[in-house]
Image (cartoon, coloured by chain):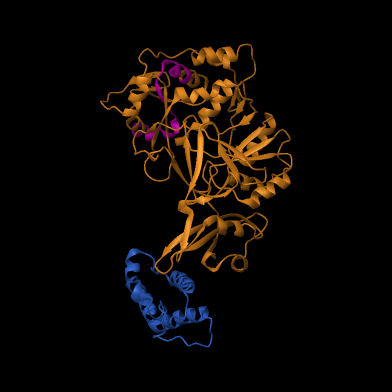
């Protein structure tokens, strides 16, 4: 059955919105009643870029494109300066911008796209947001991706920084649509505004990053401004530290804290925290296998992408993906202690930046820290530490250094400490 | 800008502050690397960072980590005198 017809059945007779975006409520009936744009130009198997957002028109077009069986490339206006590069990398045949549908001429083919065409499957292209090199075009088999939604699952009212061009955003949209859920997009990204949105719309799940949670603690909003409706706070995309998690667990005893983990290349991976106050997690889900090689987590997933359209495959011959995350293992649970690139090597002695950061965070008035390796011709590398003070008081550099010397091995002690602001990006990750 | 002599004295003072044995007198020939070195490698890193700060106060950049500096590093760190000479020559080059 076609996706639009199926969703029409699911939402038949239901009058609540599935999406609250920029303060406006959007019901599924409004999607279906949109004046559809002319897609007569689009053929099955085409690669189609759609520049949109979570508005009725874009969502309707996205669902119709899936029904036609195209390889869809969702993009947003924010990345407009890179669109030409995206069109070329993804071998885009048709561009949909507003109501305008335009065919693009090119004479390229790609084996993965041909593979989908042969199978008669729809596809999905997402771009990686890696910090090195140009974004990579990640191609998924959308027909297989959609199978996961055939099993009904419970939904909780979720706040989400919905991103139309991100696997998490698309996954949340589809999960909400297939399971009669409600998703709320926050109006602004400040701690106060997000907590107020949670209160206003009875949000049950708040997905965050560790940096956001540290800022939330610093702002003094915990626990007074955290509404009772909130049942679950998830955190992911960067490494969490134990002192922050412990503090949150103590201040918010009724909230369940859960870690998330995943990457666009692998599709959706299920994660289960060992306990609300534990950084150990089980990584699994249907068709997902894990192993640890030289301390680094590798994952093999049946829902992985077909491959990159503009880069060599990151999978080994047996389909394993190197996450580059260094982990500690306890029973079948993993704790990420850092990235391979976070390994600091001082005179041949290796340790993680996080080990230094964990100790520094225990010092009075320290809110955010970042330990970085600096190259030098004597010991290869040494550690420098950037520290941000809380609003309550200043950080005494000399005292902090003595504190670290008492608790760290000599080679791990930062050789230079700077007290200033730690940069935080727009997705609440340390820059 | 300080005179060469004053600068050298200032550098030797930084070195002596990092010595475990405070009774040792810093001389041109005092070895900084090798088996007879008076500083361990971590102390030597601290010394270079302290010199970086000192140079910054004096209005120039002391380079000991770039590729160019690395290629000179063996001779640069041989003795207290050679390190002082390198510091002074970088200072003069940037004047």
The residue stretch that appears in magenta: A62-85
User: Is residue A204 shown left or right of residue A370?
Assistant: right
Most foreground residue, A421 or A152: A152
Instruction: Write the residue at 72% across / 36% down.
Output: A227
Q: How many marks?
A: 0
Query: x, y (%) of residue A374?
Result: 45, 61
Is residue A73 rendered magenta in the image? yes
Any idea which chain is the blue one in this picture? Answer: B
Query: x, y (%) of residue A262?
Result: 51, 38
Whether residue A181 can be seen here: yes
User: Is residue A66 shown left or right of residue B74?
Assistant: right
Q: State the image quarter where residue B28 is shown.
A: bottom left
Is residue B74 rendered magenta in the image? no
Whether residue A414 can be seen here: no
Colour in which the image shows chain A = orange
Instruction: Write the residue at 27% across / 23% down.
Output: A105
User: Is residue A357 shown left or right of residue A99?
Assistant: right
Residue B18 vs A18, above or below: the answer is: below
Q: State the image quarter where residue A231 is shown.
A: top right
Dominant secondary structure (helix, strand or loop) of the stretch shown in magenta: helix
Instruction: Write the residue at 51% across / 37% down.
Output: A289
Most foreground residue, A368 or B94: A368
Query: x, y (%) of residue A209?
Result: 58, 42
């Amino acid at each position: 059955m076609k996706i639009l017809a199926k969703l029409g059945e699911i939402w038949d007779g239901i009058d609540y919105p599935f999406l609250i975006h920029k303060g406006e409520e959007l019901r599924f009936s409004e999607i279906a009643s949109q004046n559809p744009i002319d897609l007569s130009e689009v053929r099955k198997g085409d690669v189609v870029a759609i520049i949109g957002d979570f508005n009725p028109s874009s969502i309707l077009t996205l669902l119709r494109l899936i029904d036609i069986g195209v390889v869809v490339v969702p993009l947003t206006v924010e990345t407009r300066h890179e669109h030409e590069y995206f069109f070329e990398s993804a071998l885009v045949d048709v561009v949909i911008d507003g109501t305008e549908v335009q065919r693009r001429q090119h004479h390229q083919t790609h084996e993965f796209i041909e593979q989908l065409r042969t199978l008669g499957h729809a596809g999905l292209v997402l771009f990686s947001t890696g910090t090195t090199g140009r974004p990579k075009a990640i191609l998924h088999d959308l027909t297989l991706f959609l199978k996961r939604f055939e099993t009904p699952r419970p939904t909780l009212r979720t706040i989400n920084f919905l991103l139309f061009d991100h696997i998490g955003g698309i996954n949340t949209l589809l999960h909400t649509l297939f399971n009669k859920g409600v998703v709320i997009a926050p109006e602004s990204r400040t701690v106060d505004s997000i907590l107020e949105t949670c209160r206003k719309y009875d949000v049950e799940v708040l997905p965050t990053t560790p940096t956001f949670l540290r800022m939330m603690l610093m702002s003094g909003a915990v626990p007074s401004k955290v509404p009772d409706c909130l049942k679950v706070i998830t955190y992911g995309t960067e490494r969490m530290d134990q002192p922050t998690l412990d503090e949150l667990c103590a201040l918010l005893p009724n909230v369940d804290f859960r870690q998330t983990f995943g990457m666009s290349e692998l599709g959706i991976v299920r994660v289960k925290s060992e306990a609300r106050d534990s950084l150990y997690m089980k990584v699994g889900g249907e068709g997902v296998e894990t192993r640890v090689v030289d301390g680094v987590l590798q994952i093999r997933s049946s829902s992985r992408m077909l491959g990159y359209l503009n880069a060599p495959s990151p999978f080994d011959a047996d389909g394993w993906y190197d996450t580059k995350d260094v982990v500690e293992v306890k029973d079948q649970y993993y704790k990420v202690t850092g990235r391979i690139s976070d390994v600091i090597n001082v005179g041949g002695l290796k340790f993680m930046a996080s080990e230094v950061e964990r100790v520094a965070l225990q010092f009075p008035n320290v809110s955010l820290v970042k330990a970085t390796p600096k190259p030098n011709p004597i010991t290869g590398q040494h550690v420098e530490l950037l520290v941000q003070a809380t609003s309550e008081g200043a950080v005494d550099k000399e005292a902090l250094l003595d504190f670290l010397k008492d608790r760290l091995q000599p080679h791990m002690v930062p050789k230079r400490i700077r007290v200033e602001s730690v940069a935080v990006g727009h997705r609440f990750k340390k820059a | 800008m300080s005179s060469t002599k004053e600068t050298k004295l200032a550098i030797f003072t930084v070195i002596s502050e990092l010595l475990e044995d405070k009774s040792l007198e810093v001389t041109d020939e005092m070895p900084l690397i090798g088996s007879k070195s008076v500083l361990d490698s971590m102390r030597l890193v601290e010394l270079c960072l302290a010199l970086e700060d000192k140079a910054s106060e004096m209005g120039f950049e002391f380079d000991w980590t770039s590729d160019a500096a690395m290629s000179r590093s063996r001779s640069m760190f041989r003795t207290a005198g050679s390190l002082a000479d390198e510091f002074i020559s970088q200072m003069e080059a940037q004047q």
